[in-house]
Amino acid sequence: MDNHTSFNPRETAGKIITCNAAVVRGPKQPFVLERIQVDPPKKMEVRIKILYTSICHTDLSCWKGENEAQRAFPRILGHEAVGVVESVGEGVTDVKEGDHVIPIFNGECGDCIYCQKGTTNLCGKFRVNPLKSVMANDGKCRFSSKDGEPIYHFLNTSTFTEYSVLDSACVVKIDPKSPLKKMSLLSCGVSTGVGAAWKAADVQAGSSVAVFGLGTLGLAAAEGARARGASKIIGVDINPDKFDKGRTIGITDFVNPKDSSKPVHEGNEWWRRRLQLRMRRKLGILREAFLSTHDGWGKTVLVGIYPSPKLLPIHPMELFDGRTITGTIFGDVKGKTQLPDLARDCLQGVVNLDGFITHELPFHKINEAFGLLTDGKALRCLLHL
Ligand SMILES: NC(=O)c1ccc[n+]([C@@H]2O[C@H](COP(=O)([O-])OP(=O)(O)OC[C@H]3O[C@@H](n4cnc5c(N)ncnc54)[C@H](O)[C@@H]3O)[C@@H](O)[C@H]2O)c1
Ligand SMILES: *[C@@H]1O[C@H](CO)[C@@H](O)[C@H](O)[C@H]1NC(C)=O
Ligand SMILES: [Zn+2]
Ligand SMILES: [Zn+2]
């Protein structure tokens, strides 16, 4: 049993909380544990105590300053976590103090035309936008340094802190009996990977799937494909250390592009004819993934975040061959209304969450945890706050 609810919301509700946060002051600057101040939640906001947080490659990209999200510093990164509600702002009715919750970077307000549609998980008000770094309510930060300097938010979540303030659209209540550590995985990586296979690619029993990049996202996509009954799952990675874990998840074939000078799709005629799902980070590989799928019906789903704006490396005429390509945010899962079902599937063993947490460290070792991901040694390193 996790027992982390040893704080007394009655003493803190409505007041500023002073706590520790890992603040990053510029691209590639080490995280510094600082005492910060966290304002109480305003209207339709929730303040949560983070219990566990893990590091996703998207945190790494922002920390490196690889994309537009770099501009706002000092900043509190982190978006994959599990926590407990400390207090709620005016108008919040679906969560209350003491509830166990998962932050979601791709919110669901429930009211807008996007949320009303069954076909998209992009909310009109709270869809993820890495350029945003202040609260939607008033354009301000809820975090400040001890000198009163504002500290920016990240991906509507900011979880590398003992306390965070989120829009209630970005907070999902979970069953209090759920194992908290594993629930952190559902906050981003595993939900996105499984959702990519189940919803975006809609993998069918007996189909063939290839996954490019066998980090948490790729392995979760493979796990999703396995759960759907895919008969062949091909794992592609330039780091062969990832293959062992892949094998335990049910990946049936492995390709290391570094072992061959030929593009992946040329060397593998048999697979080229069988693939449905691909995910890639580098531009060239995206094209390879696309061309590796079966003509007529092959489907490529992009999950990886690109460092800078690039155009798709596809000739328009190639789209007449019947292949499709799409991208997914948060695995097309609607956070508030559909994530609880996915959590239930995980608890019932439909999706196996074992093995994704490869390391656990105390919060103050966050720089070490980042190093593990950078070096390709960790899937998820869980930080204990
Ligand atoms: N779309 C979304 O909603 C969403 C959500 C979370 C993460 N992401 C993105 O998904 C990607 C994966 O995240 P992660 O946390 O699993 O990362 P990770 O670092 O754990 O895994 C990435 C894997 O890709 C492999 N790789 C790198 N270059 C490769 C190449 N050229 N060919 C084959 N394999 C290669 C690495 O060896 C590593 O195993 C990142 O780009 C991240 O930003 C997207
Ligand atoms: C949350 O997302 C919405 C929509 O992108 C944005 O307006 C808001 O500023 C974001 N909040 C934070 C703290 O980034
Ligand atoms: Zn993520
Ligand atoms: Zn909405």
Image (cartoon, rainbow, N blue to C red):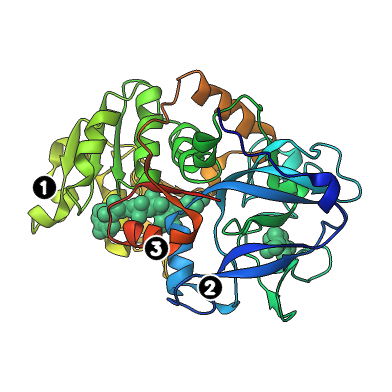
Rounded to the nearest angstrom, the CA distance separating label 3 from label 2 is 32 Å
Residue matched to label 3: 312
The amino acid on which the numbered mark 1 sits, given as a three-letter code, is: Gly
Task: Judge left or right: residue 6 versus residue 226.
Answer: right
Does the image show residue 40? yes
If you read the primary sequence from the N terminus, does the residue marked by circle 3 or circle 2 appear first?
2
Where is residue 255 drawn, in percent x and y?
16, 45
Task: Judge left or right: residue 313 versus residue 165.
Answer: left
Mark 1 element type: helix
Which residue is located at x 47 percent, y 77 percent? 27
**Residue placed most toward the observer, 90 or 338:** 90
Splitting the image into 4 quarters, where does residue 117 fall? top right
Which residue is located at x 35 percent, y 57 percent? 373
Residue matched to label 1: 267
Image-quarter location of ligand 2: bottom right
Question: Farthest residue toward the top?
Answer: 348
Mark 1 Cα shell of 10 Å, populated few (<14), some (14-19), many (≥20): few
Q: Are marks 3 and 2 in contact (CB under 8 Å)?
A: no
Mark 2 Cα shell of 10 Å, populated few (<14), some (14-19), many (≥20): many
Rounded to the nearest angstrom, the CA distance separating label 1 from label 3 is 22 Å
Say which quadrant the N terminus sits in: top right
Where is residue 139 drawn, in percent x and y?
79, 71
Rendered position, 197 above or below 363: above
Rounded to the nearest angstrom, the CA distance separating label 1 from label 2 is 44 Å
**Residue placed most toward the observer, 150 or 199:** 150
The amino acid on which the numbered mark 2 sits, given as a three-letter code, is: Val
Which residue is located at x 25 percent, y 45 percent? 292
Q: Would you say the beta carbon of the disc 2 residue lies within 8 angstroms of ligand 2?
A: no
If you read the primary sequence from the N terminus, does the residue marked by circle 1 or circle 3 appear first?
1
Mark 2 element type: loop
Disc assigned to residue 24: 2
Task: Judge left or right: residue 304 versus residue 38.
Answer: left
